[in-house]
Structure formats: structure tokens, C-alpha cells
Image: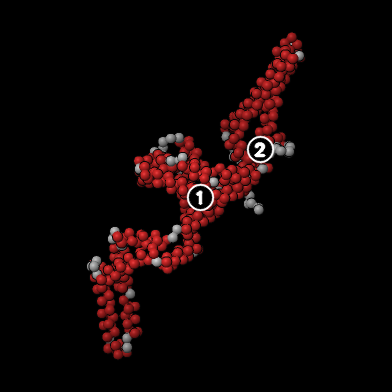
């Protein structure tokens, strides 16, 4: 399978800490070279003190070997040493795709197995942590907060928006299809009727019917005129019939609006109650609702709406990740802080949220673990080799330069020990 190459900026400057440690490690190696040359010359010039200087020369010589060996090993991770294509060098750029596959498989085996996810999630108090952060977002480590925000923003930008959006849309669509809508609608309607919350709906329907009647009187008059006989039209009685019909309908609607016990209104309420029962228990009604739901989900307009919904959510997440302080400002910030306090004080709510989060994450791992792994693998494959090399080197290069320093010093100490043993056995 061919993967589209994504060109990323390769001119990212190395972190200052990495530059400093590289200068220190290289400077120490140069110092060992100079010390070796000086000590070697002094051993030849002053034979009387040759034994003392021989220890210095042994230390410097072994330190040079250790420093050069570690320099070669570290450089070989990211590029060919001195530009020479020595076998088994430039390991990271040559094995970029394999590294991506290994990273994805590690993620799959250690983080996306449902049993592992469930076990780890049981130890996490997500509600409590979210509550503490929402109640006091400026508390704790600002460095961690900024780093986490930057990481989230980079992840959202790094993943293919179309593929990730497709996964989100598929997940939402699968969740909608998995939940039967008819019983839920029936329960909602039944609860609304029990608490008389359906009354505003009936009032609105009656007012709408009255307005529609007033705006379409001419249609009623035209219909009566067309259906009336020639005698009625000749005598003008068709107009009288139209007036009586319109007045009667208007009076009926006004009576229904002001009288909650009007027979037709009671009939409408009875029909709503029957509809609530049918939505919950009638197989034919439930099947029709499910068919309608499937048509709606598969409708191209709904699919475009889901795409737009994901893009808006992604843009909102990016804004919050880039500027987390702005998300906590104004009325939204007050609401979020109140939510945070509630999450900390309401134990039952916290348990419910933790259970919901755990089940959701486990479900995502079970349903979309393979897709996430493939997404990570293909994303790493699409990156430019020089870019991923530079970023990895910038991330861990400072510690690798410490290895060079340690290799130089440890090599020197080993050289001293070997030289001392050699003299003792001579």
C-alpha cells in the first residue's frame, strides 16, 4: 500500500538544552584528545615522571575511545556518521515505517485491550480530577497544563482530519443505529403527558392552526366555490357557506385554545397517550420508526451535518487546547467552575461519571482499537523521514548527550583500572 508523503518543516531549531549538552560532550572529547597528546609528549620528555603521566595518558586514551564509541552509536541512530553510508546506521530514518508499526502495536497490546483499559480505568478518579481542575484551573503545574494543551493540539493537527472525522462519524452513526429510538420517544412522551408538559405543545399546535386558517381563507373559499353547484354560485350562497365554514372553524379553534376540557382537545390528548403506548410496545410502529431513523442516518444531508458537527468540535477543541485560559473566562468559566465543585462534592455523581467514562473507553477500545492502531501507524508512515528524525532527536537528544559524557568519563576510569592492573602484573 502506498502512503501519501506529508512534507513537514525540517528546519526546527534544536532546543537550547540539547545544544548546550552537545557542546559539553564534544568539548569534553576534544579535551581528552588534547590531554592524551600532552600526556604522551610528557611521558617521552620526562621519563622520570613517566609512570605518573602514563596514568593520565591511559585515562585520556580510554576516554577518547569511550567518547568516540558513544558518539558513533548516538549519531548512527539518526544519520550516517560523517555522511558515510556505513551498514546499520541512520537507524531511525531507515526504519521509520517499522517504528510506526511497532509503536502502534505497542499501543494496541498495552493500552487498547478492553481488559487492560478496564483495569487501569478502575484506578482512575476521572470525575474527581476533572472537578479539581475545573474548580481551580490555575492551580497545579502551569507547565504541565501548557504541555498537555500543546500535546492535544499537535495530536489533533497530526491525525488525518478526514480519516479521524470518518471514525467519529462512524462511531456516532453506529451508536445511533444501536439504540432503538421508538421506546425512548414513547417514554419521553409518556413522561411529558404525566407532568402536563404536553399542554404547551397542544396550545402551539392550536395557535398554528388558527394562524394557518386566517392566512388561507382564500383557498377555502376557492375550494367551496369549485365544489358548489351552479345554482349556489349563481345565488351567491357559496360565499355564505364559505363564511360559515371559516367562522365555525375559527370558533372551534378558539374554544379549544381556552377550554382545557374541550372534547376535541381531550381526543388529541388521548391520541398522544395512545401514540406513547404504541411507540413503546407496538411492533409495527417501532419498526416504522426504526426504518425512518435508518433513512435519516443514511441521508446525505445528515451525513454532511455530522461532518460539519465534527469539524466544529475539532475546531473548538483546537481553540481550547491552544488557549486553555480563554475557555475558563466569562460565564462559561463560571459554569465550568460550578460543575467542578459539584463533581468534587457529589459522590454519587462522581461514581456515575467514572463508571460511564470507564465503560465508554472500554467500548471504544473494543470497537475501534484496531482502527486507532492503523491510524497511528499510517500517520507515522506519512511523516517525512527527516522530520521525524529531527523531532525524535530534539526530544531525547539531551539525554543522549549525557550518555556521551558518561561514556567519556567511564571509559577513562576503565582505562585507569586496566593500566593499574597492567603495571601491577608487570
Up/down of 352 relative to 65, above or below: below
Q: Position of residue 261 (x, y in %)?
A: 24, 68
- In front: mark 2 or mark 1? 1
| Residue at image location 55% in from the left, 49% down from the top | 369
- Identify the residue position indicated by label 1 in the image: 364
Q: In this rendering, does residue 383 appear at all?
A: no
Per the image, label 1 sits on a secondary structure element best described as helix
Up/down of 99 relative to 244, above or below: above
Q: In which quarter of the image is residue 38?
A: top right
Q: For this view, does 65 lie left or right of residue 151?
A: right
| Residue at image location 48% in from the left, 65% down from the top | 295
Q: Where is residue 91 in the image (x, y as percent from the top left)?
A: 67, 39
Per the image, label 2 sits on a secondary structure element best described as helix
Q: For this view, does 209 lie left or right of residue 312?
A: left
Q: Quadrant of residue 69?
A: top right
**View extreme (top): residue:** 48
Residue 78 numbered mark, or none: 2
Q: In which quarter of the image is residue 8?
A: top right
Q: Where is residue 381 in the image (x, y as percent from the top left)?
A: 62, 47
Query: Nearest the camera: 372 or 73?
Result: 372
Q: Position of residue 202 (x, y in %)?
A: 30, 65
Which quarter of the image is occupied by the C terminus?
A: top right
| Residue at image location 31% in from the left, 73% down from the top | 213
Up/down of 271 relative to 85, above or below: below
Amino acid at each position: 500500500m502506498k502512503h501519501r508523503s506529508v512534507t513537514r518543516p525540517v528546519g526546527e531549531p534544536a532546543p537550547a538544552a540539547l545544544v548546550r549538552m552537545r557542546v559539553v560532550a564534544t568539548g569534553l572529547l576534544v579535551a581528552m584528545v588534547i590531554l592524551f597528546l600532552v600526556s604522551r609528549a610528557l611521558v617521552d620528555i620526562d621519563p622520570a615522571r613517566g609512570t605518573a603521566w602514563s596514568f593520565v595518558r591511559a585515562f585520556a586514551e580510554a576516554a577518547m575511545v569511550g567518547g568516540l564509541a558513544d558518539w558513533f552509536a548516538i549519531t548512527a541512530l539518526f544519520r550516517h556518521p560523517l555522511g558515510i553510508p556505513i551498514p546499520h546506521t541512520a537507524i531511525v530514518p531507515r526504519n521509520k515505517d517499522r517504528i510506526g508499526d511497532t509503536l502502534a502495536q505497542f499501543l494496541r497490546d498495552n493500552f487498547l485491550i478492553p481488559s487492560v483499559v478496564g483495569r487501569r480505568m478502575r484506578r482512575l478518579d476521572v470525575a474527581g480530577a476533572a472537578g479539581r481542575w475545573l474548580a481551580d484551573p490555575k492551580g497545579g503545574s502551569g507547565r504541565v497544563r501548557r504541555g498537555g494543551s500543546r500535546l492535544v493540539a499537535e495530536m489533533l493537527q497530526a491525525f488525518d482530519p478526514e480519516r479521524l472525522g470518518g471514525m467519529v462519524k462512524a462511531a456516532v452513526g453506529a451508536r445511533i443505529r444501536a439504540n432503538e429510538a421508538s421506546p425512548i420517544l414513547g417514554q419521553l412522551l409518556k413522561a411529558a403527558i404525566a407532568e402536563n408538559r404536553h399542554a404547551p405543545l397542544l396550545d402551539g399546535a392550536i395557535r398554528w392552526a388558527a394562524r394557518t386558517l386566517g392566512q388561507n381563507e382564500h383557498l377555502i373559499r376557492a375550494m367551496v366555490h369549485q365544489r358548489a353547484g351552479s345554482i349556489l354560485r349563481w345565488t351567491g350562497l357559496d360565499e355564505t357557506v364559505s363564511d360559515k365554514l371559516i367562522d365555525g372553524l375559527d370558533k372551534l379553534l378558539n374554544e379549544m385554545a381556552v377550554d382545557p376540557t374541550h372534547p376535541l382537545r381531550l381526543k388529541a390528548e388521548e391520541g398522544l397517550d395512545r401514540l406513547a403506548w404504541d411507540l413503546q410496545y407496538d411492533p409495527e410502529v417501532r419498526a416504522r420508526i426504526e426504518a425512518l431513523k435508518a433513512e435519516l442516518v443514511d441521508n446525505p444531508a445528515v451525513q454532511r451535518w455530522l461532518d460539519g458537527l465534527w469539524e466544529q468540535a475539532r475546531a473548538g477543541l483546537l481553540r481550547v487546547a491552544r488557549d486553555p485560559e480563554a475557555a475558563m473566562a466569562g460565564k462559561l468559566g463560571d459554569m465550568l467552575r460550578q460543575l467542578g465543585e459539584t463533581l468534587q462534592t457529589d459522590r454519587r455523581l462522581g461514581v456515575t461519571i467514572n463508571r460511564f467514562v470507564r465503560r465508554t473507553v472500554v467500548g471504544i477500545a473494543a470497537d475501534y482499537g484496531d482502527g486507532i492502531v492503523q491510524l497511528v501507524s499510517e500517520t507515522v508512515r506519512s511523516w517525512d523521514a527527516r522530520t521525524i528524525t529531527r523531532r525524535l532527536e530534539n526530544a531525547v537528544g539531551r539525554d543522549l548527550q549525557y550518555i556521551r559524557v558518561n561514556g567519556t568519563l567511564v571509559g577513562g576510569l576503565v582505562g585507569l583500572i586496566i593500566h593499574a592492573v597492567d603495571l601491577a602484573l608487570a
